[in-house]
Image (cartoon, rainbow, N blue to C red):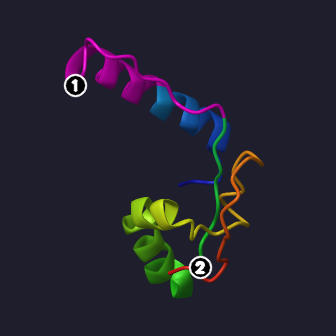
Amino acid sequence: MPATIAISDLLRFVKAGSSRFMSHDLRPNSSFAWQGSYGAFSVSARDKATVANYINNQREHHREGRTWASVEPGDGTDETETDDTAG
């Protein structure tokens, strides 16, 4: 992503477009809403595979309570242990 694009502008565009797609094309009779917050991180080339693996297995990490607390802090009501070395 070029440094000239603000992350908030990019996410506003992505959220609007994907919300329209979900609401009008993919699931017109269901309610779809994005969560209120988001995070954006830069990742070194060295860590790219680790981060991609984490994202690919994110559903399992959440189900098992093994999230990276530093990037997925939750809402404070979750009692599960977190693992900052999940991969």
In the picture as drawn, the residue positioned furthest to the front comes out as 79
Helix, strand or loop at disc 2? loop
Left or right of residue 66, residue 24 in this image: left
**Dot 1: element:** helix
Q: Give coordinates of residue 82: x percent, y percent.
A: 67, 71
Q: Estimate how packed mark 2 is, as few (under 14), some (14 to 19) or many (20 or more) residues with alpha carbons within 10 Å.
A: few
Question: x%, y% of residue 34?
Answer: 52, 30
Q: Is residue 17 magenta?
A: yes
**Does 30 sit above or below residue 82?**
above
Give the distance between the C-alpha atoms of the residues marked 1 and 2, in whole angstroms: 34 Å
Residue drawn 25% across the image and 13% down it:
28
Relative to 36, say whether 25 is above or below.
above
Q: Which residue is mark 2?
A: 44
- Quarter of image, res 75: top right
Amino acid type assigned to the residue bearing label 2 in the image: Ser
Q: Looking at the rendered structure, which numbered label has been put on residue 45?
A: none
Q: Which mark is residue 26?
A: 1
- At 43% from the left and 72% from the top, the residue drawn is 52
Q: What segment is highlighted magenta in the picture? A: 16-36
**Total numbered badges shown on the rendered structure:** 2
